[in-house]
Amino acid sequence: MASKLWEKNVQVDHDVERYTVGRDREMDMYLAPYDVLGSIAHITMLQSIGLLTADELDVLTAELRSIYVEIEQGRFAIEDGVEDVHSQVELLLTRRLGDLGKKIHSGRSRNDQVLVDLRLFIRSRIEDVVAAMTRLFKTLQEQSERYKNVLMPGYTHLQVAMPSSFGLWFGAYAESLADDLAVMRAAYHITNRNPLGSAAGYGSSFPLDRAMTTRLLGFASMDYNVVYAQMGRGKTERVVAQAIAGVAATVSKLAFDACMFNSQNFGFLRLADEFTTGSSIMPHKKNPDVFELTRAKCNRLQALPGEITLITNNLPSGYFRDLQLIKEGFLPAFDEIIDILTMVDAMMRQVKVNEHILDDSRYDLMFSVEEVNRLTQSGVPFRDAYKQVGLEIEAGRFCPVKQVAHTHAGSIGNLCNAEIEELYRHELDRFDFDTYHKAFNQLLGRQS
C-alpha cells in the first residue's frame, strides 16, 4: 500500500481512512487531466525561480505529458491506498524518476492543487454546457420562426386567457436561455482566476511567480489575496451551481409545458414516438417519460446550490475537510445538464405542432380582449367596451374574430427573434475559450 504524502510514522486506521477518503478517488478522476496541466505550469514556474534546473524541468515535463496521454487513453487510475489524484500523479513521477519526482510539490499544497484543478475543470465544462445551450437555443429560434403564425391559447391561472402563438412559446424559452447564458458567463468570469500559489491559504516563502502560472494556464487574472483564494473553495462551486440551476429552471418549465400540452386534454403538441413509452396494461398510452425525467433531473440540479450552501455556510476562513463533500454532487452536475440539454434539443427538433387548435370552440373566449380593443379603437371608452363584451359573453352572444393584429415589439406579429439572437450572441462572444485552449496546447507541447 502506498504511503500518504503527509504520512510519517503512524499509519491511519483502515476505517478512518475509508471514512475520510470517501468517494474522493472516484471524484478525482474528473480532475486528473487538469492536475497534470496544473503541475506542468507549476514546475515551469519553479524552474524560472531556480528551484529546478532546465534539465530537470524537461524530464518532469515529458513524464507529466506522458501521464496526460495515459489519462486521455483511459489507462490512468488512482490506486487503492492512494488518497487522491494529486498523490497518484506524484507517486507515478517518483516511481519513474526517483527523487526528482518529489520536487514538484515545492511551493504548493494539496489545497491550492485542488483549487486550480477545480477551476480548470469548471472552465472546460462550462464551455461544454455553453455549446449544448447554444444548440438548444438555435433549435428554439428555428421552431419559433417555423410556427410563428400558428395561434395557441395563452393562460393565466391555468385559465384560457388571450391569444398566444407557438412563435411566442418557442421564442420565450430561447430568450430565457439568453439570460441564463449571461449568468453562466458571470460564473465563468469568477472561475477564470488563478488560485495557484496560495498554497495552504497563506502563501509561501518561496518567491513564486503567480503571474507566470496565471499566464501559462490561460487564466484571465488571479485570485490575488491568498486567504481569499482558499475562501473561493465552495464559493466558486456555489456560483457555478447557481448558473447551472438557472438553465435547469428554464428547461424544467419547458418540460412541464411540453408534458401538459402533449396530453389529450390539450393536444397542442405531439412528441415523436421515440421519446414516449407505453403502458403495461393500457395499449393506447404514449407517456412523455423523457420530459418527465427531464423535469425531475432539472429540479434535482436546482437543489445543488442549496446543498453547497449548507456544507459551507458555517465555516470560517481557511481550509476544512467538509469542502471535500461538495465534489460528489457538483462534479457530475455538468454531465447531467449537458445530457438534459442534448435530449431536449432532440425532442424540440422533432416535436409536432397542432395547427388547428382554434377549431375547438372552447378557446373562443380568448379573443374577447381582441374585441374589447377593436371597440376601443373605434372610439368606445375602454371600460364601456369591456362591459359590452362581458355582457355578450354572459348572454351567450359573443362571436369571436379569430384573427389578431399584434405589432408591438415582442408580440405575436413582431417576435423580435433577431434581437433575441443578438442578445444571445452578445453574451456568447464574451467568453474567451480560445485563450485557455492555446495555453493548454503549449503546456502539452501540441499545435494550437
Image (spheres, rainbow, N blue to C red):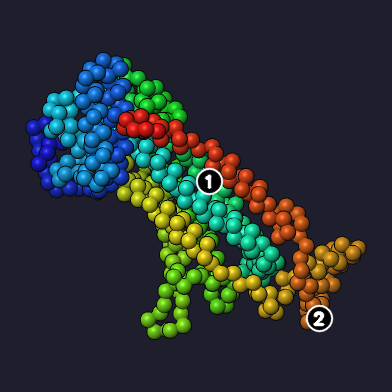
Which residue was labeled with disc 2?
Answer: 397
Task: Judge whether 120 appears above or below 416 on screen.
Answer: above
- Kindly indicate the quadrant of the structure image that contains residue 109: top left
Which residue was labeled with disc 1?
Answer: 181
Q: Earlier in the sequence, mark 2 or mark 1?
A: 1
The residue located at (13%, 33%) in the rendering is 95
Q: Report the amino acid beneath label 2.
A: Arg
Q: Nearer the viewer, residue 374 or 342?
A: 342
Q: How many marks?
A: 2
Q: Report the amino acid beneath label 1.
A: Leu
The residue located at (87%, 62%) in the rendering is 377
Near mark 2 (Cα within 10 A), the count class, few <14, some 14-19 or many ≥20, is few
Disc 2 from disc 1: Cα separation: 48 Å
- Kindly indicate the quadrant of the structure image that contains residue 262: bottom right
**Does the CB distance between marks 2 and 1 fall below 8 Å?**
no
Task: Judge whether 163 appears above or below 20 on screen.
Answer: below
Task: Judge whether 427 appears above or below 441 on screen.
Answer: below
Q: Position of residue 106 (x, y in %)?
A: 24, 23
Q: Position of residue 375 (x, y in %)?
A: 86, 67
Q: Position of residue 38 (x, y in %)?
A: 31, 32
Q: Position of residue 335 (x, y in %)?
A: 38, 52
- Kindly indicate the quadrant of the structure image that contains residue 44: top left
Q: Nearer the viewer, residue 55 or 370?
A: 55
Q: Find numbered disc 1 in the image and state the secondary structure of the residue it sits on.
A: helix
